[in-house]
Amino acid sequence: MKHIYAWLTLILTTTFVASPALTSPFMGFTEGQLPIPQIDPPVQPAGYAFAIWGLIYAWLMVSALFGIVKRADSASWDHPRAPLIISLAIGTPWLWVANQSAIWATITIIAMAITAIWAMLRAPQFNRWWLQAPVGIYAGWLTAASCVSLGSTMAGYGIVLGSVGWAYAGIIIALIVCLTVLSRRPQAPEYGLTVVWALVGIIVANFGSMNSVAALAAVGVLVVLGMIANAWRSPQTA
């Protein structure tokens, strides 16, 4: 069917954006969801950082509408649309899933992150602000959020490390993924800057109470910003 990828992207973006209005809010895993309750775990950014979802929802919606109007039959747009459709399909019921099961919330948000990153890596360079940028911030936030979910769930089940240990692990995993992605797509600073936004949120949440976690996040901020700056000084990204 002609334009099927463009229409599926628009439909699933709409269901994804509408999903918060159709389910109970998710404010983190509750005491009953984990054997060891994780209330405000150190791996989690300060609450204000989650406001980025407003930008993500709005920009993805604008991108999907632009795609229908201007790029419905574009093969170069269909290439990233395929994994993005999968990510949005998983993401539409994610809030409901997260309120039911920490384990399934973690599994599904990791799947969302993988497919979102895949979509961003496939995005063409032309019309960058209409496709790569919105998908990039979506993928960047999911990179951080999946590590938050993983760290909270693993700590909540008492697996190997405590909440502080899993905060370290979550930050390190997020940095490894972020730097790997940026090495593949150095022209996507919006992805890296979104991870930086999450790391700054972790600094704010832990400063003065868990300074070692805040310090590790600060190192991560400097490393990511350094990689972005170096990429944009290089001739191939100019």
Image: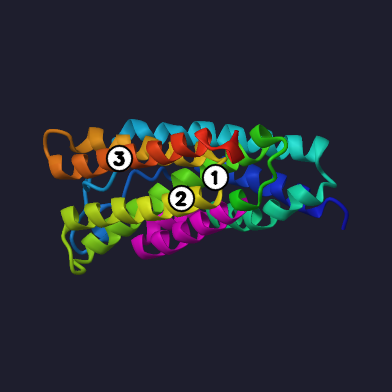
Q: In the image, which disc is placed on residue 45?
A: 3
The location of residue 193, given as percent across then percent down, is: 44, 36
The outermost residue toward the front is 235
The residue wearing badge 1 is 19
Q: Nearer the viewer, mark 3 or mark 2?
A: 3
The outermost residue toward the right is 2
Q: In which quadrant is the C terminus drawn?
A: top right
Q: Main secondary structure of the magenta part?
A: helix
Residue at the image point whose x is 21% and y is 69% from the top: 159
The residue wearing badge 2 is 95
Q: Nearer the viewer, mark 3 or mark 1?
A: 3
Region in magenta: 92-119
The location of residue 152, given as percent across then percent down, is: 27, 56
Rounded to the nearest whole Å, what is the CA distance between mark 3 and mark 1?
22 Å
Tell me, yes or no, whether the highlighted magenta stretch contains residue 113. Answer: yes
Amino acid carrying label 2: it is Leu
User: Which SS class for mark 1?
Assistant: helix
Above or below 161: residue 85:
above
Query: In this orientation, which residue lies closer to the viewer: 185 or 204?
Result: 185
Q: Are marks 1 and 2 in contact (CB under 8 Å)?
A: yes
